[in-house]
Image: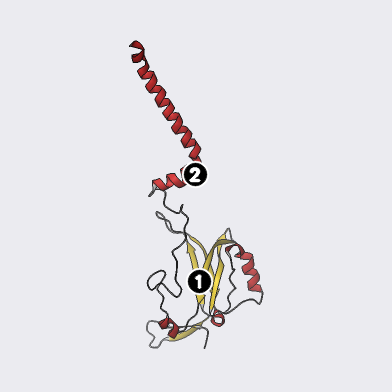
């Protein structure tokens, strides 16, 4: 079987027949931030030629741009069509002042299946049903991953309390001591007059 993508489309809107174009299969992944009030910003991308792929890193610590460049120059490229499945970490490349930088790391598992296997083992898009083949767990986000203005109690708990716990406690104790002293000074003349 040919390991190419076939695109059938008309060259011009007046063309009668569709032209068939064969291209090397590529997977392009882009990373964008998710701004609430302004436009999303492009952070970086990862482009993988499925016939000549760089082997993924086994852990996020080993996933670096330098390793990607070394793997590209060496004869260590593999075809996803021959290997059928791959899992690991790939670095996403961004640009800052014309230089390549590490914009993020993507953990993926890629699998090539035949049309018959696809019908036998259905998979939903993302975490939609049927969530199997493979089963996707919910993302493991840190507890501090929230919008500070929509949840002020979490802001107090995770940001202010952790950093300023002793200052807040000292201010509360000082407030109650001053309150007690003020009530005492206010009530003392009445008790002294009796």
In the rendered view, tell whether residue 185 sits above or below residue 85: above
Q: Which mark is residue 162?
A: 2
Q: Residues within 10 Å of mark 1 (few under 14, many from 20)?
A: few
Please identify, in this view, whether the residue under mark 2 or under mark 1 is nearer the observer: 2
In the rendered view, tell whether residue 173 sits above or below residue 118: above
In the rendered view, tell whether residue 114 sits above or below residue 108: below
Q: Residue at x 43, y 53 (%)?
A: 146
Residue 4 percent across, percent down from the top left: 51, 83
In the rendered view, tell whether residue 70 sits above or below residue 178: below
Secondary structure state at the residue bearing disc 2 = helix
Relative placement, left or right, of 93 versus 183 is right
Q: Residues within 10 Å of mark 2 (few under 14, many from 20)?
A: few
Q: Nearer the viewer, residue 70 or 39?
A: 70
Q: Which mark is residue 62?
A: none
Q: Quadrant of the C terminus?
A: top left
Q: Are marks 2 and 1 in contact (CB under 8 Å)?
A: no
Of the image marks 2 and 1, the number of the one nearer the N terminus: 1
Relative placement, left or right, of 3 versus 151 is right
Secondary structure state at the residue bearing disc 1 = strand
The figure's colour scheme reads secondary structure
How much space separates mark 2 and mark 1, taking CA atoms? Answer: 40 Å
The image quadrant of residue 47 is bottom right
Residue tagged by mark 1? 28
The image quadrant of residue 191 is top left
Residue 154 percent across, percent down from the top left: 42, 48
Q: Residue at x 57, y 61 (%)?
A: 102
Q: Nearer the viewer, residue 43 or 185?
A: 185
Residue 192 percent across, percent down from the top left: 36, 12
Q: Residue at x 44, y 33 (%)?
A: 172
């Amino acid at each position: 079987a040919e390991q190419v993508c076939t695109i059938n489309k008309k060259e011009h809107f007046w063309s009668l027949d569709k032209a068939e174009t064969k291209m090397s299969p590529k997977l392009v992944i882009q990373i964008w931030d998710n701004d609430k009030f302004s436009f999303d910003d492009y952070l970086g991308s990862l482009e993988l030629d499925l016939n000549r792929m760089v082997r993924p890193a086994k852990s996020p610590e080993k996933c670096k741009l330098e390793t990607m460049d070394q793997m590209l120059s060496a004869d260590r490229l593999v075809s996803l069509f021959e290997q059928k499945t791959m899992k690991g970490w790939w670095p996403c490349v961004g640009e800052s002042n014309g230089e390549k930088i590490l914009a993020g790391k993507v953990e993926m598992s890629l699998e090539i299946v035949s049309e018959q296997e696809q019908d036998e083992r259905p998979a939903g898009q993302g975490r939609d049903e049927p969530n199997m083949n493979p089963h996707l767990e919910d993302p493991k986000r840190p507890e501090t991953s929230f919008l500070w203005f929509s949840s002020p109690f979490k802001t107090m708990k995770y940001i202010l309390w952790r950093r300023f716990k002793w200052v807040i406690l000292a201010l509360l104790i000082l407030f109650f001591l001053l309150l007690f002293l003020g009530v005492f000074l206010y009530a003392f003349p009445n008790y002294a007059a009796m």
